[in-house]
Image (tube, helix red, strand yellow):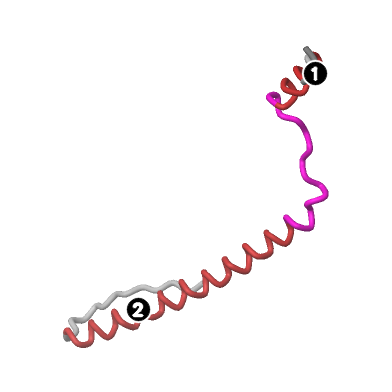
């Protein structure tokens, strides 16, 4: 990625400064658009990888789930 540096050693007219700022802002805007597109592509890749690895999801129980299952095993629902 290119770096934009606005530095002027000699005094310039206000019009020249405005033109330089507009050029700098346009360049920054272009970089932001490019970064958003790249980010969108990466997000899409991540979603595709999540879908592909859906079969390998973590199926381990949390402590709470284990305790609930143990309670249901010891005290089955529907029995008085």
Whether 61 is among the magenta residues is yes
Whether 75 is among the magenta residues is no
Q: 10 Å neighbourhood of mark 2: few (<14), some, or many (≥20)?
A: some
Estimate the spatial distance between the alpha carbons at disc 2 and disc 1, rounded to whole Å: 70 Å
Where does residue 28 sit, x and y in percent of width and height?
Answer: 40, 74
- Comparing 32 with 6, the one in front is 32
Residue at left 29%, top 83%?
20
Looking at the rendered structure, which numbered label has been put on residue 76?
1
Q: Secondary structure at mark 1?
A: loop
Q: Measured along the vertical axis of the image, is residue 54 above or below residue 12? A: above
Residue at left 81%, top 47%?
56
**Where on the picture, by quarter, is residue 48?**
bottom right
Q: Secondary structure at mark 2?
A: helix
- Comparing 55 with 34, the one in front is 55
Q: Which residues are magenta?
A: 50-64
Q: Measured along the vertical axis of the image, is residue 31 above or below residue 42? A: below
Point out the residue furthest to the top here: 80
Where does residue 46 sit, x and y in percent of width and height?
Answer: 68, 59
Q: Measured along the vertical axis of the image, is residue 52 above or below residue 39? A: above
Left or right of 11 in this view: 61: right
**Where on the picture, by quarter, is residue 16?**
bottom left
Q: Which label sits in the foreground, 2 or 1?
A: 1
Q: 10 Å neighbourhood of mark 1: few (<14), some, or many (≥20)?
A: few
Q: Measured along the vertical axis of the image, is residue 65 above or below residue 45? A: above
**Where on the picture, by quarter, is residue 77?**
top right
Left or right of 9 in this view: 63: right
- Where is the C terminus found, in terms of image quarters? top right
Left or right of 57 in this view: 11: left
Counting residues from the start of the chain, the first of labels 2 and 1 encountered is: 2
């Amino acid at each position: 990625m290119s770096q934009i540096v606005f530095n002027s050693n000699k005094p310039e007219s206000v019009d020249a400064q405005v033109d330089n700022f507009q050029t700098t802002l346009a360049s920054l805007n272009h970089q932001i658009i490019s970064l958003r597109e790249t980010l969108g592509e990466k997000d899409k890749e991540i979603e595709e990888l999540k879908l592909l690895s859906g079969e390998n999801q973590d199926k381990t129980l949390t402590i709470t789930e284990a305790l609930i299952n143990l309670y249901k095993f010891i005290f089955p629902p529907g029995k008085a």
